[in-house]
Image: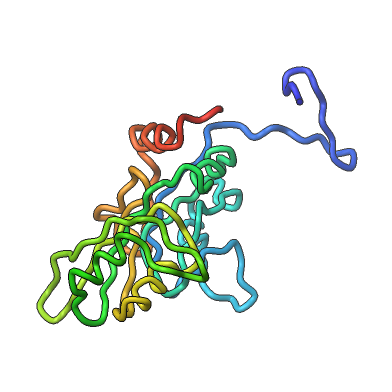
Amino acid sequence: MIDPELDRVTVHGQLVAPAVGAHHYLVVNKPVGVIVSAGDPGQRRTVFDLIADEPGAPRLFSVGRLDMDSSGLILLTDDGPLAHKLAHPRHKLSKEYLARIVGVPSERELRLLREGVMLEGRTTLPAEVELAASPPGQVWIKLVLREGRNRQIRRMLDQVGHPVKELSRVAFGPIRLGRLKSGAWRRLRPAELTALRSAVGGHDA
């Protein structure tokens, strides 16, 4: 343990000063084709390129992931303890998605998705699933999950015969994407941060 008012810390002889100021908490609306990574050998655009003008951006990291073919809400922060709680499976933090799919699922298929389907020998946790309002010629479905397996929604919908054409995350726990435009970002509001901490049983500063 280090007391910054009493202790002097150096690395290779250079004095290290503690970070000053509050943590950063950002909501980003990730577009399709952007990857959630701090860097990419293939020079693809990353979610961190979208926030390059934010002071302190190089120190941020993502809470969870979205695959390159999906869009929607990503949380970025430099608050490690809170990020760890948000990502920990024991809290079963809800994540809401909208998926445009092939075909119209039957009530039986919707019930299967709600009750859980078998993926790699394990049944998925119960989920909230319902058809969403859709433009003519399209079928959208809303899903609320409390776990986060790799490409889970795409695999669940493949399992019941309705592959995903388009997928977006619209909420992460109490935080909603709202009208944030694709590729844009904003800071969490104080009330949102309080709600996020409450969702994982508080937060030790």
Answer left or right for 47 relative to 193: right
Question: Up-down: is 176 above or below 151?
Answer: above
Q: In which quarter of the view is residue 200 placed?
A: top left
Q: Residue at x 33, y 33 (%)?
A: 191
17 and 189: which is toward the camera: 189
Query: Which of the 4 image quarters holds residue 18?
Result: top right
Give x and y (percent) for residue 61.
56, 52
Q: Is residue 31 visible?
A: no
Give the side of residue 45 with respect to residue 131, left or right: right
Question: Residue 144 in the image: x percent, y percent?
Answer: 32, 56
User: Residue drawn 37% across and 46% down?
Assistant: 173
- Residue 134 lies, in percent from the top left, at 14, 70
User: Which residue is most to the right?
Assistant: 13
Q: Residue at x 84, y 35 (%)?
A: 10
Q: Is residue 195 left or right of residue 67?
A: left
Picture quadrant of residue 190: top left
Specify the farthest residue to the left: 136
Q: Is residue 11 above or below residue 60?
A: above
Residue for point 46% across, 29% down: 202
Tell which of 41 and 141 is nearer to you: 141
Q: Nearer the viewer, residue 126 or 143?
A: 126
The quadrant the N terminus occupies is top right
Q: Is residue 205 above or below residue 150?
A: above
Residue 54 drawn at (x, y percent): 49, 50
**Colour option used:** rainbow
